[in-house]
Image: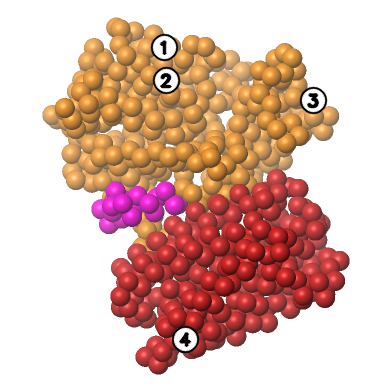
Amino acid sequence: MVNQVYINALGAFLPGLPVANSAMEDHLGRVFGKMSKYRSAALKQNRIVQRHYALDPNGNWLCTSAGMAAAAIRDALNNSEASAKDIDYLAVSSTLGDGLVPGLASHVHAELGLGALEIANFQSVCASSLMAIKSAWLQLKCGEHSCAAVSGSEFASRYFRPGNYECVDEWREKGEIPFEADFLRFTLSDGAGAALLETEPNARQASLRIVWIDIRSYAHRFDACMVGGMVRQDADWRYWSGFPDTIAAAHAGAFVLTQDFDLMQRMLPVWVSHYLDLIERGMIVIDDIDHVCSHYSSHGLRRQIVDLLERAGAMIDEQKWFTNLYQKGNTGTASIFIILEELYRDGRLKKGDRILCHVPESGRSLNGFMLLEVV
Amino acid sequence: MGEPRAQAVMRGLLKVWTDFSCDMDATPLLDKLNRGKFRLEDYRVLLINHRQQVVEGSRWIARAGSSITGEYADQRSLFLRHAISEHRDYRMLEADYVSVGGVLADILQAEKNIGAEALHAFMYQRASERNPFDLLGAMFIIEGLGRQKAGEWGRSIQKQLGLGDEQISFLLYHSVNDEDHMREFETVLNSGILDIPDMDRQIVKTARIVARLYRLQIEELGNV
């Protein structure tokens, strides 16, 4: 049995009020009591103007990652023709759960208060969203289940509190933190998004049929790029669990999220290659794409690559690109859900439209595409 | 913007190029550069290798030009002009080499490594064939390096070794000066050569061969 699978509802949850660029540093707290010297460079690069945090300025939690995921799923249910009792599969994605053990999916299930059901937990970085959607798509496609809830939730800001950096010996001596650590403080923020998938389309409102999902890892070609829980010592990675104790790991900086910016730039060509391969295989037909939802903005692509893509007839008109990263923040694995939720609500979708979703992940180079058709 | 066949060739080439540019990062020399451990000696070896390519490059393009038959006279002119525009660029490399402590005679007399021998032998063989427009695939790969990578490497080498602009002139110059070449390339691609049976496929295949051989000569630096 092979079913068609439809995204029948989308939901989003953004904690607290939006925090503007001018307020973000005082909201997260100033590291070593100083203004960051990389703030404007990071904001210029990511072009984000506001975001949300699940922490208040005193560091108190407004909610958990599991709570945000459950709130987004409830929002999707509110927008759905299905009800909570119909859900028989729950796929949860996140970069980091609230704790180390057990998996976040268990906590999200508990928060939702649903009966016994099958769950799956996907932990990676941004592209864990597509892993979770793909698992739900396949579960429904083969008839194992008929209604799936999928969530992506991130609570990055709890790693951005000053104390998390100030305990690193090397940085304390210098009185400042490096760009690879500071950049992410100004780039990532909190939130959750969710999708409800069923094997029948909506009766009253538009559905998004999943045409295909294609995910590829390039970890065989690249070293780790966005890391947490590990730190480079000399030439090798040292994991937090390999230190004599967690205090020593913290002093060495093993709990800090960092991003190797140059390495990320070197990943762009393989992501472009993946895209060209999908065109070659006829899975992407440029003229048939009506909307592009990319977790990576076109301005981040180097001019030369855009130029080459244009010459090759492979660039999708920038007017078709839709994003809300700049207003909602880069919420990692939650972003693609939050982008789709707004696109769906926005009213611009017409029957027959094709939506190309793109979620690259710099973690250790992973790239995913998903094609949807409005029915 | 070109015709659909030319666009399909461009997509094929772009795909070969993107894979190639990442594969290049895995070569020992560029891996070392990416890890921030580049030595002055590495830079000198790279300059020697580049000089051989530049010298041979304008020669095989000229030979390819002379293998083009009368019906493609316009394209032949472009090939020959291209060969002329680059044929003295090696002087910059020699100056860079001497400025970082190299002895001029060494870069002039250096023997090709086993990868470079294979690369150049292939180029001359193809360039001697009748109407070897498949070499556009080779040009795309090699020009692409100049256009996209030379500046990146140049700036990184300059930073790691603390060099002045005049010591890294070739790599920096190429990153800003190769823009016109891409337009020229597109002109030839759209000039009717794709009417030659199977030429579209051959261009992309030659690009794949050259990408592999180019990487081989970087992997074999010093192995003469």
User: In the rendered image, which quarter contains the C terminus of chain A?
Assistant: top left
When the figure is inspected, residue A160 is found, relative to residue A22, above or below; the finding is: above
Asked whether the residues under the numbered discs 2 and 1 touch, taking CB atoms below 8 Å apart as contact, a structural biologist would say yes
Spatial CA distance of label 4 from label 2 is 62 Å
Q: Earlier in the sequence, mark 1 or mark 3?
A: 1
In the image, what residue occupies the spot 22% across and 40% down?
A374
In the image, B78 versus A160, the foreground residue is B78
Query: Tag 3: residue type?
Result: Asp
Asked whether the residues under the numbered discs 4 and 1 touch, taking CB atoms below 8 Å apart as contact, a structural biologist would say no
Pointer 2 residue: A121
Residue under mark 2: which chain is it in?
A
- Do circles 1 and 3 both sit on a common chain? yes
When the figure is inspected, residue B97 is found, relative to residue A291, above or below; the finding is: below
Of marks 2 and 3, the one in the foreground: 2
In the image, what residue occupies the spot 36% across and 73% down?
B199
Spatial CA distance of label 1 from label 3 is 36 Å
> In the picture, which chain is orange?
A
- Do circles 3 and 4 both sit on a common chain? no
Pointer 1 residue: A106
Occupied quadrant, residue A244: top right
Residue under mark 1: which chain is it in?
A
Q: Relative to residue B175, is residue A350 drawn left or right?
A: left
- Do circles 2 and 1 both sit on a common chain? yes
**Where residue B20 sits: x, y (%)?**
52, 56
User: In the rendered image, which quarter contains the N terminus of chain A?
Assistant: top left
When the figure is inspected, residue A106 is found, relative to residue A233, above or below; the finding is: above
Query: Tag 4: residue type?
Result: Ser
> In the picture, which chain is red?
B
Spatial CA distance of label 4 from label 1 is 70 Å
